[in-house]
Image (cartoon, rainbow, N blue to C red):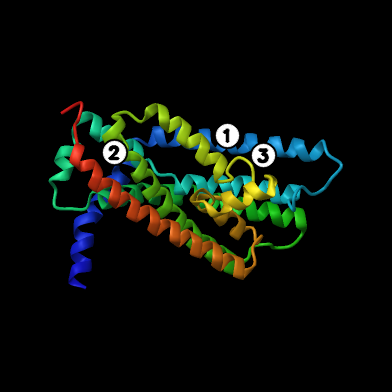
Amino acid sequence: MTKLRHFFRIYLPFSRAGIQEMVAYRANFICFLIGEIVSAFIMFFVWKAVFASSSQQTFNGFTLEDMVVYVFITFLTGYLTYSDGAFAIGEEIVDGSIATRMIRPCSFDMCFLFHELGSRLISIAMIFVPIVAGVEIYRCVITGSVRFDIPHFLLYLLSLTVAYGISFYFNVCYGFMAFFFKNLWGTSLIKETLTSFLSGAIVPLAFLPAPLAAVLNFLPFASLSYTPVMIYMGMYSYAEIAYRIGLQLFWLLAMFLLSKLIWRCAVKRLSVQGG
């Protein structure tokens, strides 16, 4: 218990700093949020046009109602699991401030993690309840019955939490590449685009050819978005949910261990451009 109190005494100030940063730069946060919401509505109108132009009521097991839920819950999931650890680490390597962080008596990745968790509290307070409530009201109006399922929702929250852990350590691993490449701006654009596609954030993986979908479902990218969203929508049986969450936990552990391995290799060749 004493060790736990000591742990939180060290890292909770980083969460408070994350909250203060979000409050201080609230205009930037609001503009970014508006941009993401606009993107979600663009996807909504695209899929609405697709269904309107077809005589079929269902595509690969998805009705229009399902696609609307998929689009907005995918937006919510992607927003809450987004991690900018790669950018932050890269910037510190460029300006040299990472040297100061490395001599502090605290874990490098835990500092970033608790800082992000602080900012996530603001995000959850502002968008989580409104979006979930809006989606459920829409489903109720369209179907004439309450579709909200508490067990699936709780499992979604569990999957969402693990997905954030995978996203965080994946971005930490990528951020450590700045030790070798010095600048990650260009490759970050490629990473974000590929991650969005491979995670099912743009097109559901069920719409892809079966062999490709099977491979992508096993890779860690599906665990970032597709798995939590499909759990929320009730598309998986409980046995399938257990397998998917187990796979998420596997990738979380794999990313955590990979980040430690890359860190040990990277610090041996640290050279900064700033400072």
Q: Callout 3, which amino acid?
A: Phe
Foreground of the two, 2 or 262: 262
Residue that label 3 marks: 44
For residue 193, the mark is: none
- The residue under the point 51% across, 48% down is 221
Residue that label 1 marks: 38
- The residue under the point 35% across, 45% down is 173
Q: Callout 1, which amino acid?
A: Val
Q: Is residue 237 visible?
A: yes
Figure quadrant of residue 148: bottom right
- The residue under the point 36% across, 46% down is 119
Q: Earlier in the sequence, mark 2 or mark 3?
A: 3
Q: Callout 2, which amino acid?
A: Ile
Percent across and percent down for residue 117 are 35, 51
- The residue under the point 22% across, 53% down is 107
Q: CA distance from mark 2 to mark 3?
A: 34 Å
